[in-house]
Amino acid sequence: MKELLAIVEARARSSHRPHVLATVVKVEGSSYRRPGARMLVSAAGRVAGSVSGGCLERNVVSRSLEVLMENRPRLIRYDTNDQDDLELGSSLGCQGTIEILLQPVPAGLWPLEELVAGVMAEGKPLAWALPYRVDGCPGMVGEVFPIRAEGSVGDDFLHGEALREEAERVMASKRPGHVSWRNGESVTEILIERIAPPLSLVIFGAGHDAPPLVRLAKELGHRVTVVDRRIEFAQAEHFPEADAVLCLPVHRVPGKVPLGEGSAVVVMNHHYETDRALLGLLLSRPLSYLAMLGPRKRTDRMLTELSREGMELSSEGLAALRAPAGLDIGSDNPEEIALSILAEIQAVVAGRSAVALRSRPGPIHTLAL
């Protein structure tokens, strides 16, 4: 979502001018970016985003300028298996093929911008379809089709049911999908994506080790809220990057702090009673990630005490709990600890095991389109 927001914001700053949106729509084999990667291009060159590690951008910008002049979409294909790529002037050796849709974005209203604004306002993820090859109906290429359970796609699109079925898989896996069909000589190919608001990260504790966690989390595009019971610590000037800084005792947290489904929470008050009270409150919430800073014995003691006091510890709550917080990367100082915690959050949200990539069998990315 971070890249898409940056693209929408960059385009909004010059919405009176035409642009070209480059979208990776299909990948076979290896590539640096996956389907859904985007780059916005103006007449002056790249504005925001990227479609590769830097090897394709220059050529994509050049071809985007041609699309600007022609004012019609174009689907381009790069073969990084080619040992003598005349188009790029060098061999990339990435062993894959990449298809990128270049679509003109005229001045004025932009449907993609409206889609992003709607998801941000509702705070809920949404699946949407991007047709990138529609033989016989080129006007559909690059259009935005939200996919909702009530069937809004069916009225506008052929094979609406197939799109909805794939959209359900995409929403569950959080990875892009693909639908295609052939009608005689005509081929239709559609990219299905999941768009979601930024991850909400709530940090309980505004001590000296919190600022690095806030800064790095914002670099990753998360929405960050810092909460502390101490007024001298919960000061906005201590956390200029944070979206919100709140001074609240534990009993006022419900209803005041965004703890929606899928939120990530890190408890780092370094105060036993406060942390225990928060743990008792948070274990019943539908969080995707809940971490306690400090030794394992400390958290185990809290759980034992909460159980003795009559609290039922659900398997779901305990499954979300990470204690001690973070991955084992040899962290020592606050910056390294922040990296460890955010790397663990990324792994949990993405459904990955956080093993070294060289130990992972098969390709780095689990889905090739």
Image (cartoon, helix red, strand yellow):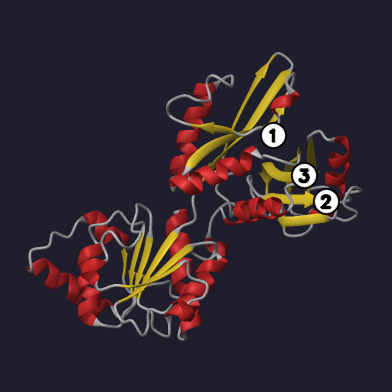
Relative image position of residue 311 (x, y in whole percent): 12, 62
> Taking the image as drawn, is residue 369 in sight?
no
Which residue of the protein is positioned furthest toward the top in this rendering?
184
| Label annotation for residue 20 | 3
Relative image position of residue 142 (x, y in whole percent): 69, 34
The reply to whether the C-beta atoms of the residues labelled 2 and 3 are less than 8 Å apart is: no
Residue type, numbered disc 1 = Gly
> Taking the image as drawn, is residue 126 in sight?
yes
**Crowd rating for badge 1 (residues with CA inside 10 Å; few <14, some 14–19, many 20+):** many
* Left or right: where 220 falls relative to 104: left
Relative image position of residue 334 (x, y in whole percent): 46, 83
Task: Identify residue for label 1.
Answer: 142
* Left or right: where 222 falls relative to 273: right
Task: Identify residue for label 2.
Answer: 61
**Crowd rating for badge 3 (residues with CA inside 10 Å; few <14, some 14–19, many 20+):** many
Residue type, numbered disc 3 = Val
In terms of sequence position, does the residue under pointer 2 or pointer 3 come before the other? 3
Q: Is residue 236 above or below residue 63?
A: below
Seen from the viewer's position, the closer of residues 337 and 73 is 73
- Which quadrant would residue 262 be assigned to in this image? bottom left
Relative image position of residue 1 (x, y in whole percent): 56, 53
Give the spatial CA distance, label 3 vs label 1. Answer: 11 Å
Give the spatial CA distance, label 2 vs label 3. Answer: 9 Å
Q: Secondary structure at mark 3?
A: strand
Q: Residue at x 87, y 52 (%)?
A: 88
Q: Residue at x 65, y 54 (%)?
A: 9
In terms of sequence position, does the residue under pointer 1 or pointer 2 come before the other? 2
Give the spatial CA distance, label 1 vs label 2. Answer: 18 Å
